[in-house]
Amino acid sequence: MSKSKEKIQSLDEAIKLVSHWAQTEKIVFTNGVFDLIHPGHVLYLEEAKSLGTKLIVGLNSDISAKTLGKGAHRPINPLEARAIVLAGLQSVDLIVSFNDETPLELIENLRPNVLVKGGDYTLEQIIGSSEVLDNGGKVHSLSFLKGYSTTAIEQRILKAGLDQ
């Protein structure tokens, strides 16, 4: 198995790994679709990782991503492709996909020390924030790199195709 694929685990395997990490590591959790990886994603994940020593990404499954209202054609890339690309990033230590609309079950089971989301979320809007805070952890809303979003990239691609 490749090093990247080793980072992609089921919830049961992740729970075992994280219980081992919890003895010595500061565990950070974030989640998202991460459909078309762009500089904003890379910098966001690096900033998230800087808040601890291990970074877990809860990755929306294709079914879960469709519930987010980003359009019937999203995600553009299937779960396995998105997971492999994320796993190739140095900042990411573990990827666990989820089928639910929110990652709450992952957060409750993995019990991270730090929970992060992008700057478009207030602390009160971050799913799992009360659970992490109740366990003595911290919650952060990180900044965005302006000008980058999967939706904007998708629109530029569609426009380029129409202009031909």
Image: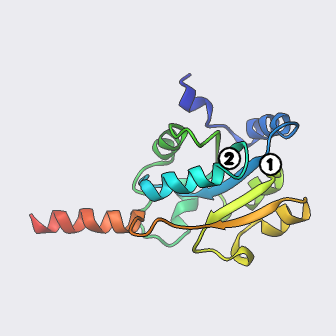
Tell me what residue is drawn at x 86 percent, y 65 percent.
Answer: 133
Left or right: 74, with 107 as reference point: left
Counting from the top left corner in percent of width and height, residue 154 is at: 33, 64
Quick one: SS at disc 1? helix
Viewer-closest of 131 and 66: 131
Q: Residues within 10 Å of mark 1 (few under 14, many from 20)?
A: many
- Do the numbered discs 2 and 1 sit on residues whose CB atoms are within 8 Å? yes
Q: In the image, which is nearer the foreground, mark 2 or mark 1? A: 2
Nearest to N terminus: mark 2 or mark 1: 2
**Residue located farthest toward the left when viewing the structure as drawn:** 164
Q: Nearer the viewer, residue 129 or 13?
A: 129
Element assignment for label 2: strand
Mark 1 = which residue?
A: 110
Numbered label tally: 2
Image mark for residue 159: none
Q: From what the image shows, is residue 21 above or below residue 121? A: above
Residue type pointed to by label 2? Ile
Q: Which residue is mark 2?
A: 56
Image: 5 above or below 150: above
The residue at the point 69 percent across, 39 percent down is 10
Q: Note whether 84 is above or below 107 in the view shown.
A: above
Splitting the image into 4 quarters, where does residue 16 fall? top right
- Kindly identify the residue that appears in the image at 70 percent across and 52 percent down: 51
> Residue 24, how many percent across, how many down?
85, 36
Q: CA distance from mark 2 to mark 1?
A: 9 Å
The amino acid on which the numbered mark 1 sits, given as a three-letter code, is Leu
Q: Residue at x 42, y 65 (%)?
A: 149
Residue 12 appearing in the image: yes
- Which quadrant: the C terminus? bottom left
